[in-house]
Image (spheres, helix red, strand yellow):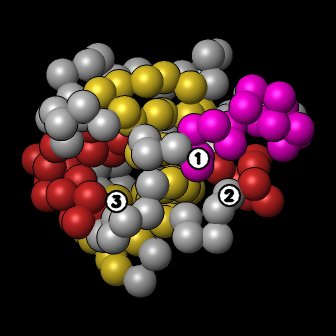
Amino acid sequence: MKEIFVNGLGDLPDAAEEIIAALDGRNVVAFFGSMGAGKTTLIREICAQMGSEDVVTSPTFALVNRYDAAEGRPIYHFDFYRIDTPEEALDMGYEEYFYSDGLCLVEWSEKIEALLPDDVMTVKIEVQSPTKRRIEID
């Protein structure tokens, strides 16, 4: 387990770099945090640090967005906030993404926790103040 403290938006590039460095071959990252904790903002910075020039937005209604990292590796950004059961993730074919060579960044992963691979990286974001966050990577 590793802790990162973010004192403002200026700390996000370093936090994103630490998360990328901790991947260690894993390709599914499950983000946990309350509404407004900064999950999408952190994912946007991870994509930027990986060289993506795509506009990163929350895929709340589409469930998944695809971006391209600088070296061409796909980045899949999931938002499962609006699903009611894990079966909905099964219906959308989550396995094709999670077991591909792409990086999968998953918001509201608690909705599909039983479907996450054993080697999933977890990123927990705790709001400490309007501008400060504690991030736990495991």
Quadrant position of residue 62? top right
Residue 77 is a magenta residue = no
Of tags 3 and 1, the one toward the viewer is 1
Of tags 2 and 1, the one toward the viewer is 1
Q: Position of residue 38 (x, y in %)?
A: 40, 43
Which residue corresponds to mark 3?
133
Query: How far apart, in angstroms, are the residues tagged by discs 3 and 1?
Result: 27 Å
Q: Which of the numbered marks, if any, corresponds to residue 55?
A: none
Q: What is the magenta segment's predominant secondary structure?
A: helix
Q: Position of residue 136 (x, y in %)?
A: 41, 71
Q: Which residues are magenta?
A: 85-99
Query: How far apart, in angstroms, are the residues tagged by discs 3 and 2?
Result: 25 Å
Q: Position of residue 18 (x, y in %)?
A: 22, 65
Q: Secondary structure at mark 3?
A: strand
Q: Secondary structure at mark 1?
A: helix
* Residue at 43% in and 41% down: 102
Which residue corresponds to mark 1?
98
Mark 2: give few (<14), some (14-19) or many (20+) Cα within 10 Å.
some
